[in-house]
Amino acid sequence: LRQIGGGGRDAAAAYVATTSVSGIEVLPDNRTVLLRFGHAVQLGHLGAAAIAMLGLLPTTGVGVGAVLATLRFWLPHVVVTPNKLALARPVVNTPGFMTLRWDGIELTSRDIDLLGEERCLNDSVMDFFLKLVVEVLAPPELREQMHVTSTFFFQKLTSCGVESGEEGWENVRKWHGNLKDGLLSQDYIIVPINEQNIHWWLLVVCFPRRALEQTPLDGLPSGCHPRIVCLDSGQEPPPKARATSFLRGYLWREWRERHPEAAAAAGSIHKLAAEKLPRSFQMRAIDADVPKQHNGYDCGLFVIEYLMTFFRSRSALKGLGWAPHQHWFGQGVVSHRRRRLRKIAEGLRNIAVQRSEPDVARLLQDAALRSKVREMLGDLPKDKRDRAPDAEESRLYSDGRPPKKAASLAAIERARSQLQQ
């Protein structure tokens, strides 16, 4: 907390433990946010007596909603009383609308409402749109080289009190049976992670087999080196050591279960079940310098945008972690993406109702509809100031190459009008 002196300079400051905040309210003027403390606190150098509450007044141009979203991010333990928030928008699963389904993922009206302004995304929205991005934007050759895990993968890997990735492997041993040689068959393993149920970030494992097989790296460009890259939009992101350690342990156990002889030679093991990660298995962890969010609620959108960037730029994955990536996109692109994703979800839901078909995989077999979804998903804000600085470098190269039997313009226009209804 700071007291502002003449000329806008800080005159004094005081520090208050976040754990002392017990409640958040919005006063009737719908501008002032009231913090209530569990016990009276002393503001020290600010010269005030001990207080039990403190009012926060947003600066000009900052809405109360943005303040509340930031406070929720900073103070996840504090309950905001719903009936005292003038701008609270109840989330309702609207009767009469069909729930979208796709390979076990369900997207309800309640989930779609989370794509409204100043809302945090849940696992259903994240899984749905990460899958949609891969389905319609990923070039075929890259789609064969990567796998995006479920948002529940890391949560399950670390559950049941396990202390390492080697132990956690038991929790997810059957999760990727549809992949030949499991996750290790992929050059890129993309893992969305929800930190303490309040913050999304992305972990990308690059070329894990090269580390496990101890492939000589001499002569290979740095983009082909094995590594674990963490992409976090938070201004003060949480430490990543635990997450990267669990992934290393999981990959080693997965490798050793599938290749026991090679693993034994690398680790000099006696009992596979008790084997620890050998020192010979090295995979560097990197905190990537990526675009950062300007609020407390867009972390999920940034994760989706990071994935989309891999398909826009030919160099994004190759150089991942080795150079600054701040030029990828700005906050304006993410705000624009939120609106577009909601429009896509609502459009697909309307078409599902019209056709009595909730299965998104079947809906996307319509070439015109698929083309329109790709167009809406990949567009950028009209205002160039909201785009990435290097837009030319970020050209989209998706599987949008003309199909053998291209959809007619009339069919595309029909899909466009249906999506926009």
Image: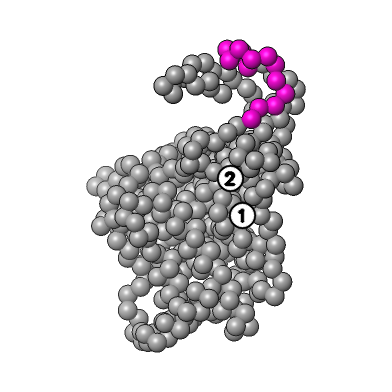
Residue 179 seen in the figure: no
Examine the rendered structure and indicate whether residue 4 appears above or below residue 132.
above
Give whichever of 291, 169 is nearer the camera.
291
Q: How many marks?
A: 2
| Rendered image quadrant of residue 143 | bottom left
Disc on res. 65: 2
* Image location of residue 372, percent across then percent down: 43, 75
Magenta stretch: give its range: 43-55
- Spatial separation of the CA atoms under disc 1 and disc 2: 19 Å
Looking at the image, residue 55 lies above or below residue 31: above
Residue 47 coordinates in the image, percent (x, y): 61, 12
Image point 38% across, 59% down: which residue? 381
> Residue visible at 40% across and 45% down?
291
Q: Disc 1 residue type?
A: Asn
Residue that carries the numbered disc 1 in the rendered image: 122
At numbered mark 1, what does the secondary structure look like: helix, strand or loop?
Answer: loop
Q: Residue furthest front?
A: 29
Q: Earlier in the sequence, mark 1 or mark 2?
A: 2
- Residue 219 at what x, y percent from top left? 24, 47
Amino acid marked by disc 2: Gly
User: Horizontally, is 8 left or right of 32 in the view?
Assistant: left
